[in-house]
Image (tube, rainbow, N blue to C red):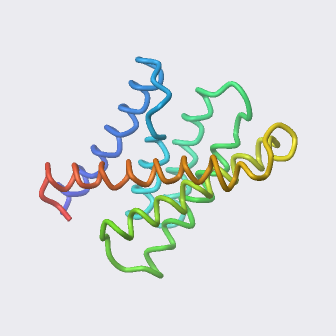
Amino acid sequence: MAARTTTFWTFIVILVLLHLSFRIGMGLTVIPDLIVVAALLGARRTGGWQAAFLGLVLGVLADSLSLVGFGSTAVALVTVCYLGSRSRDLFEGESYLFIAVYAFIGAWLVEAIRGFAAGSLGSDLPWSSLFTQASLTSLYTAIAAVVSLIAYRAITGHR
């Protein structure tokens, strides 16, 4: 059991390193937000305060790379990771369909909370961007979560 836990958290670290390598190292901005994927997948494996702490650490890391709205991603990830850890009590299973819906809703909430916390909704961005741009970004993130989970399960053989 300890080997599975170590393997999973290594997978989470690899997702974060891939995000940093693609976004900062190569300057690619078209990739999905792998920090959000790592936070959402990690939150399903931890308890409430541990998921919130994971969200805080990953949120501060993501905010350290942005130019505006420092702290907005941290607030969003703490909230969504805590709620994601509580989803284990309501929903059993780890099917790809569930992970896709879970990642879509989680990524959409991150975008919405980030917009409210940064104060950009209503002033810089119209409210309709929550339903258009955030929905497309969330769909892209959900696809990335499912693909990364498929790769993890194929490589390790774990469920």
* 101 displayed left or right of 112: left
Q: Position of residue 126 (x, y in %)?
A: 80, 46
* 9 displayed left or right of 61: left
How many marks do you count on the picture? 0
- At horizontal 71% and vertical 48% (from top left) the residue drawn is 129
Identity of the residue furthest to the right in this view = 123
Q: Position of residue 96 (x, y in %)?
A: 31, 65
- At horizontal 77% and vertical 47% (from top left) the residue drawn is 117
For residue 99, which quarter of the picture? Answer: bottom left
Which quarter of the image is occupied by the N terminus? bottom left
Against 97, residue 66 (above or below) is above
* 143 displayed left or right of 78: left
Against 64, residue 40 (above or below) is below
- At horizontal 43% and vertical 54% (from top left) the residue drawn is 142
- At horizontal 73% and vertical 46% (from top left) the residue drawn is 115
Closer-to-camera residue (119/28) = 28
Against 2, residue 86 (above or below) is below
Which quarter of the image is occupied by the C terminus? bottom left
Q: Position of residue 22 (x, y in %)?
A: 40, 26
Q: Position of residue 13 (x, y in %)?
A: 35, 40
Against 28, residue 96 (above or below) is below
